[in-house]
Amino acid sequence: MTIIASVSKKSSLLIMLLAWAISSAQAHSFAADKPIPASPAGWHASPDTLSLPAHSNYESSLSALLEACRRKGYEIEPLLRDDRFEIYEGIGDRFRKSAERKSINLEEYKKILGFDDKRDRGADFIRKHADQLQKAQEKYGIPKYVIAAIIGIESDFGQNIGSYNPFNAYVSMYAVDYRADFAKAQLLELLDFTQRNSIDVFELKSSYAGAMSFAQFIPYSLNKWFVGDDIFDMDNNIMSVANYLAYFQQRTNSLRTSVLRYNPSGLYADAVMDLAKEVELATEMSATH
């Protein structure tokens, strides 16, 4: 009985293995006869989902953002497929470790900003753009030294516009769920800006916060307050900073409070106002020599 049972078990196992092999071969043959979808390698898209293996952890977020943009009339799926698209996974930490949050006092904050260097170079910026700064001051009522100070702190007088891409920055913020509502709103503003101006969004550079140009405007501010068409024209940036500050000064009757609307940090506002005073003094001293 033991020998018969053993043979019976072996026969059953052989039958099961044979059935599995036939089934596997049929499945492989069927798959080989199916046409390959015409889509980028690694991608599978449907009306409800969007899958990208490199960013599989964010599939749900990307699908939700894709649909939110579609409801507003913007199709971002081609942008998400673009080789230049990437997710900055540590973007939340960039905000959490900003200079304003790391600094414990104004002097430490100024060191991080390179305040002394900006003070020394501010007078040259004033001389180089004297005519446009004067026009902005007269038109908007904002002191030219404050305009220069903001451009100095924001972009080192136009020398540093950031190394990030604004589309990637806002999609990343949404994907990692850091200020997601803000990121979605700014992304829609960015798409409006690039579509209206026929700009390839991946050609733009920004800060990790998605701020662009020498004035470092986020997309909403670009659409509302930027003066001129070329965001990398310094004359336009000078006018735009003045236009922005004038808008809030009319509503708050305070220049410092207007500067706080640029960056809601008391350290930032104090640094801007101090740099404006230092640059004004340096400019006056250089004019007397």
Image (spheres, rainbow, N blue to C red):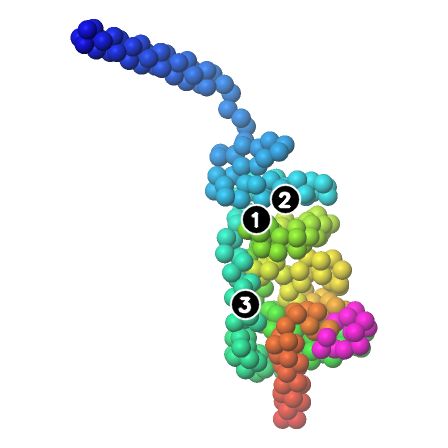
Sequence order check, earlier mark of 2 and 1: 2
Residue 120 in magenta stretch: no
Mark 1 crowd level (few <14, some 14–19, many ≥20, 10 Å Cα): many
Q: Which residue is mark 2?
A: 65
**Front residue of 27 and 141:** 27
Task: Please name the residue shown 62% across and 56% down the image.
Answer: 179
- The stretch of residues the image draws in magenta is 245-257
Q: Main secondary structure of the magenta part?
A: helix
Q: Which residue is mark 3?
A: 98
Q: Is residue 264 above or below residue 10?
A: below
Say what secondary structure mark 3 lies in: loop
Picture quadrant where residue 147 is located: bottom right
Say what secondary structure mark 2 lies in: helix
Q: Tag on residue 189?
A: none
Picture quadrant where residue 128 is located: bottom right
Q: Are marks 1 and 3 in contact (CB under 8 Å)?
A: no
Q: Are marks 2 and 1 in contact (CB under 8 Å)?
A: yes
Image x and y of residue 46, in percent:
60, 31
Q: Which residue is mark 1?
A: 175
Q: Amino acid at mark 3?
A: Ser
Residue 254 in magenta stretch: yes
Q: Is residue 134 above or below residue 97?
A: below
Sequence order check, earlier mark of 1 and 3: 3
